[in-house]
Image (cartoon, rainbow, N blue to C red):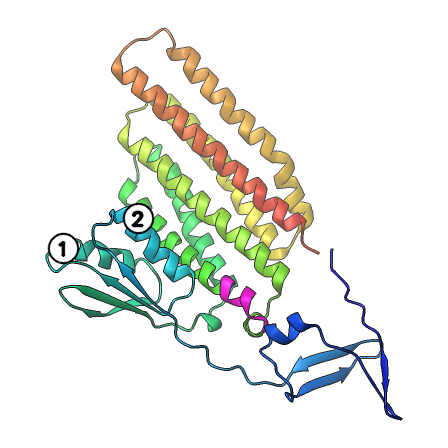
Amino acid sequence: MVKIDVRKLISFGKGSYIISMPKSWIAKNNLKKGDLISVSDEGFELILKSNQEEEKADSKEINIDAKGKDMELLKAEIVSSYLNTYDTINILFDSNSKEAQKIKDIIRNLSGLEIMEQTSTRIAAKNLININEISIKNIIRRMDIITRAMMEDAILCTTAQCTYENIHHRDVDVNRLYYLSYRVIKNAMKNPRIAKTLGTEPWQLHSDSLIILRLEKIADRQKRIARYLFENSLDRAMLSELGKAQTDISEAYNEVMKSYYSQDKELAFKVEVANKYLTEACNRLLEKYTLEHSSTKGKDVSSNLVAVAKIIENLKATAVEVRNMARIVLCYE
């Protein structure tokens, strides 16, 4: 619900009236006493706009001490600093550390962050792109294209026509775009000028952030499905049925993305309703495979049963994310 701030009109002199301005709006637009505000007469509405030129924000810099830290913890710190829009990230370590290459690999997976300096005890990375000029819609389209290719390749994995490595590399690309979009959206949410420059508004930013999160999760599920198929030798009949289930979910994904681009609520509603049948089909498939192999003993049988369960779990999770995307579209005005 939109909160309406009602303020009292006060007579000022013989020919003017004044109202007080919300302090939060003044602070958000970095205004102070004496600054100019343009007033646009729109009939029943007055549109107030700040005439202040946007001041160049101070460059944010952070130092991260890598000494004695677990690499996963260090990765989380570096990524967190990137998402929190730091422009320069300095990683400090011991001169005899052997982790420099791993640190550089982490940095290279963050779009726009480039290594500017490296010494025996320090790596300095700096953001070289203007995130205020990056189109969120273009990021979503790029993530969508990569995710579609991953889903298609996961289907091919059921017929041994793809390699897990290719899908893994695409997942890395999706992650890079996810981190970049998070950085862009956070910046736009904190600064209404940037949101206006990008041609968006708070609710759209929120919706886009949810879509981007779903895309990242779906891509991650495809990577896992491909890995389980690659690492296990399932019988041809089961592979065929898994391929059909993946195809059905992939088609639902294509439909929901079509509804997102066109803001077609009717199509999104159809995807929402059909989701139940996709998950039910996955449940029946797991039950069938379990019954067929319940009386068979052996290490390979047990391993394959676990693999099928995990593949179906990820198929169902993909279908749920597709449903969630449909719900986001249904919330559009």
| Residue 261 visible in the displayed image | yes
Dot 1 lies on which element?
Answer: loop
Name the N-terminal-most of marks 2 and 1.
2
- Type of secondary structure dominating the magenta stretch: helix
Give how far across and how far down residue 159 sits, in percent. Answer: 33, 33
Residue 320's quadrant in the figure? Answer: top right
Q: In x, y percent, where is residue 72? A: 29, 47
Asked whether 95 or 117 is in front, the reply is 95
Q: Quadrant of residue 280?
A: top right
Residue 212 at what x, y percent from top left?
50, 53
Instruction: Give the residue type that dot 2 points to.
Output: Leu
Q: Position of residue 57 (x, y in %)?
A: 46, 77
**Tag 1: residue type?**
Ser
Q: Which residue is mark 2?
A: 73
Give the distance between the C-alpha atoms of the residues marked 2 and 1, in whole angstroms.
16 Å
175 or 61, which is in the foreground?
61
Q: Quadrant of the N terminus?
A: bottom right
Identify the residue under disc 1.
Answer: 97
| Residue stretch rendered in magenta on the structure | 185-192
Would you say residue 198 sits in the magenta stretch?
A: no
Question: The C terminus is located in which quarter?
Answer: bottom right
